[in-house]
Amino acid sequence: MKIVQSILVALVMSAAAVFSPPAAAAGELKLWNWFEYMPQQLLDKFSAEHDVKVTLDTYDSNETLLAKLKSGVRGYDVAVPGDYMVAILIQEGFLEKINANRLPNFRHVDPKWVDVSFDPGREYSVPYQWGSTAFSVDTSVYGGDIDTLAILFDPPPQLRGKINMLRDVNDVLNAGLRYLGHPRCNSNRAQLAELNNLLVGAKKHWLSFNSDGAKEVLVSGDAAAGMIWNGFGMKARAERASLKYAYPREGYTAWMDNLVVLKGAPNLENAKLFLNFMMAPENAAVLTNFAKYSAGVKGVEPYLEAELSAANELNPPTGAPAGEFVPSCPPEVVRLYDRIWTNLLK
Amino acid sequence: MTRARLLLLSPTLAMIGFFLLLPVALMAVYSFLSPGTYGGVEWLLSFDAYIQFFFERDFLTDELVFHTSYLSIYFRSFVQALAATVICLLIGFPTAYFIATRPPATRSAWVLLVTVPYWVNLLIRTVSMLFVLRDEGPLNGALAAAGIVDAPLRIAYTDFAVALGLVYSYLPFMVLPIYAAIERFDFSLMEAACDLYAGRWTILRRIILPTVKPGVVAGCLLVFIPSLGAYIAPDLLGGGKNLMIGNLVALQFQGSRNWPFGAAAAVLLLSAVLVALTVLARRRALSAAGN
Amino acid sequence: MRKPKPISAYPGFSQVTWLCMALLYAPILVVAVYSFNAIRSITTWGGFSLAWYAKAFANPHIQAATLNSLVVAVAASVAATVIATAAALALARGRGFRGRGGVFVLINLPLMIPEIVTAVAMLIFFLAIGFQLGLLTVVIAHTVFCVPFAYLPIAARLSGIETFYEDAAQDLYADRWRSFRFVLLPMMMPGIFAGLMLAFIISLDDFIITNMVTGPGTTTLPLAIYGMVRVGFSPEINAISTVMLLVSVFFVSLSYLVGRRRA
């Protein structure tokens, strides 16, 4: 009996200890970001500089972020939506208008990223990273031409059954529309029916739908081709040298992720401090070295690792098309896309 | 009910009634509402969520056309759960029988051995299964080293892997109730039958099986029900490609943003489970009355 | 001369039993063994090392998730045990009453409803009543599904205690509270403890429901592990899994031993 009581007491005491953490920082910051997109080093630096305790939770697609916000999840300060999603979040009233362009470090932002269509003049958001979405192929499995979307939609025999697609409605549907030569943000029923047939027909060649595991399936050899973001693709190549990032001639998506402050952020001032902190070139460079995408601020070059300047993933070859930014689509199109997507996954 | 008893029960009633029964009822209500554009619901009565199971709107004409793709998810879940149940039974019955015929001293050690895996985190067990089955994992490594296969066997991310994961998850649920039933079996019946020149397998079929049937039925339902609503095994071992009901439900609240449809799918899953449980309860009552 | 096999033995059954044990234990043993691998590989052995444990324990996300898991599990298991003890006293003591069957079903309801259904129902409910998702919603959800696990060993223990102990105490002029506090409660203690332990590991293990009702900064250990697995295999995952494995085995064994002890 004694043992039981002492264990109970120990449990209750440990609970009490846990509920009142001894060393509380002066402030807090609740960060909501994509997985594997935030180096711990920067969080530690920010914590130390501003005496702020940072917690980080992750999501795996812009749509997941929106779904959670829409379902009423609150309490985060800062999130990292992609370009078109910034526009949707502004429109839905989920963002705090912080006059981001007046933050001190905003002067470092590359002028070409200031007057962007999704947030003209940058009142809500500041650049985080930008890059492209295409796919990587294991050249030890397939040695032919990889710069075509046929790799995904009409794959050569060596790649059949070994393809991973991103679990992202827009990335998959836009790639399909490019392969068919149809416009993006499309509400033409006949063309969408064609797209639907293309995707359903190609599905038998696909191994999985996986975003957060997009690198892992390629590195482990479970997949020999897979849709991936350029920086993630570079990380994959570091672990499996035979992987090559493709620049399909039919086109591919370019994107920019942005830091935003969510409406009703409990720690508004810390959130602004964090946005400002991330625009400092030396910090943006640490992020770029970690995530392997491109920074949206100037002056990062002195801090960048040498391998980035030569990487195929960050430097499209001459002759490759430029990446295309896809805007947010009208609700009617969103609903049609959701139908195709659910139909594809089931 | 006395006041003291009501007082003692009030925390249970409050907690489970308010935070489980009421939410399930609300979910049923949501299944009759209209979806919001990016998630959530509009408070407009609609049967679309249920109609969607059987019909879809044609892309060109918006006409309602009968389709089987959601039904096929239910069918696949049913087949997967059934396969898992049958495999569990084939492995679980001999195991339970073997354990029940051990000397009493070693018996409880065997029971503990079967019980422990159940309490180990389901996620971790499924992850370890994936780890073992992958193309470049230990199983394929061993097969290649033994010269059985040249190229790695594709096991991970298939329906077979999902079935295997379900078996692995719920096998203890099959063994334990069958064991409990066999342990109570009077083995002198067996000797009597043997004296009448009945063979071993005849005895198994004609005497043991009918006696321990309630245990077998309970075991089968205890495997079948959680398999039907499984989420982790199809998600991790199936590669997120071939959905089961659990994934379909979760998807509607995450990527696809159609809450009423997700709620309707959950309602249909719950109904299937409740029917199975009622069957179990009635069988229990019948066998209790029979004794 | 070989001893004839007893009539109750069937050929092949012992082999199937060993197959069953192999199926149940091989995957987790492989994971446990490779958590000590010195190199990153999951197929070749590069010598013994504790490096992955060190790395896992030093990871701030894992530390935060572990803390969250412990807070939730302690709070939920204590709450569930109190609720279950009260319910067991009401159901197992005294004569039957109208609605007994209904209450019994209610207690076991969390076991009957598929987890994914509970998860989305709770999500809908919390959001509909404007309850901010966070630590409190996770604790509430865990408390609800821990109640039946806490209830079973407590009720089993209580039904094994004859009422004449309390009767004797009351004959000696102990009031109802004292006879409960000094007679019945100590005798129930092993069952209560077993229930607490089971509730604790069930809470520690949950993924599906937590995943739906989690809020800012309340990532628990299973959520963190799931996130890591999706991003990529790392021996760190093996190390954390092995630790969680041992914790579960420890608490089950403890619950089993204490629950079996006679008062």
Image (cartoon, coloured by chain):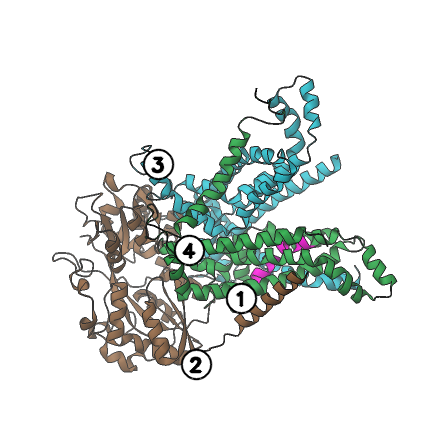
Chain colours: A brown, B cyan, C green
Image position of A83 with respect to C90: above or below? below
Mark 1 and mark 4 lie on one chain; the one further toward the N terminus is 1
A200 displayed left or right of B73: left
Q: Quarter of the image containing the N terminus of chain A?
A: bottom right
Residue furthest to the front: C1
Q: Which mark is residue A26?
A: 2
Q: Which residue is mark 1?
A: C71
- Element class at badge 1: helix
Distance of mark 3 from mark 4, alpha carbons? 26 Å
* Mark 1 vs 4: CB contact within 8 A: no
Q: Nearer the viewer, mark 3 or mark 1?
A: 3
Q: Which residue is mark 3?
A: B143
- Characterize the local packing of mark 4: few (<14), some (14-19) or many (20 or more) Cα atoms within 10 angstroms: many
- Characterize the local packing of mark 3: few (<14), some (14-19) or many (20 or more) Cα atoms within 10 angstroms: some
- Element class at badge 3: helix
Q: Nearer the viewer, residue C192 or B133?
A: C192
Q: Which residue is mark 4?
A: C239
Locate residue A276: give its quadrant. Answer: bottom left
Q: Position of residue B138 (x, y in %)?
A: 36, 43
Q: Amino acid at mark 4?
A: Ala
Residue at mark 1: chain: C
